[in-house]
Image: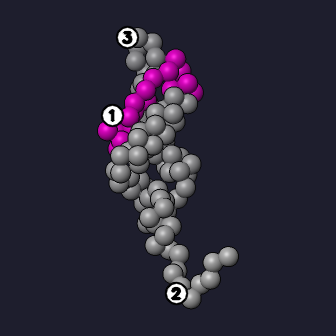
Amino acid sequence: MKYVSFKEYVREILKTAEYKKDHNIGCVVAVVPILPGCMTQGDNFEEARDNLIDAIELWLTVGLREGEEMPIINEVKLVTAVELLEEVPVTKDATYA
């Protein structure tokens, strides 16, 4: 498993997105099945994708604020302060300026 930045994590999530043309209302529906409730629409694929990026970022931001653990997507995980702290070695004799 690899830790990635917020931007890279969003890119990985986009790889799992599903797009479907809704001929009844004339729009493209975009859904991310691995993020429950994360969906949007647009007049065309490009607009639906742009809207989906916003929806993913909002979904992640709300989840992080609520203390939710983010899912592992395509063998990558969103790096957070906890993971960063675990990687930094602690030295007892460090002096602070």
What kind of element bears circle 3? Answer: loop
- Identify the amino acid type marked 2: Lys
Q: Which residues are magenta?
A: 30-48
Question: Residue 32: x and y, percent?
Answer: 39, 38
Res 64 seen here: yes
Q: Is residue 52 left or right of residue 63?
A: right
Residue 61 image-quadrant placement: top left
Q: Please identify the residue farthest to the front as the structure is shown.
A: 97
Residue named by callout 1: 37
Looking at the rendered image, the disc whose residue lies closer to the viewer, 2 or 3, is 2
Q: In the orientation shown, which residue stands out farthest toward the bottom?
A: 93
At horizontal 51% and vertical 33% (from top left) the residue drawn is 54
Query: Which of the 4 image quadrants contains residue 37?
Result: top left
Q: Amino acid at mark 3?
A: Asn
Neighbor class of circle 3 (other Cα within 10 Å; few <14, some 14-19, many 20+) is few
Q: CA distance from mark 2 to mark 3?
A: 66 Å
The percent coordinates of residue 52 (x first, y second) are 48, 32
- Queried whether the magenta region covers residue 39, the answer comes back as yes
Q: Please give the name of the residue rendered at 46% of the width and 66% of the height, measured from the top-left corner.
A: 83
Q: CA distance from mark 2 to mark 1?
A: 46 Å
Residue 86 belongs to the span the image colors magenta: no
On residue 24, the disc is 3
- 7 lies left or right of 23: right
Q: Could you tell me which quadrant the N terminus lies in?
A: bottom left
* Mark with earlier residue (2, 3): 3
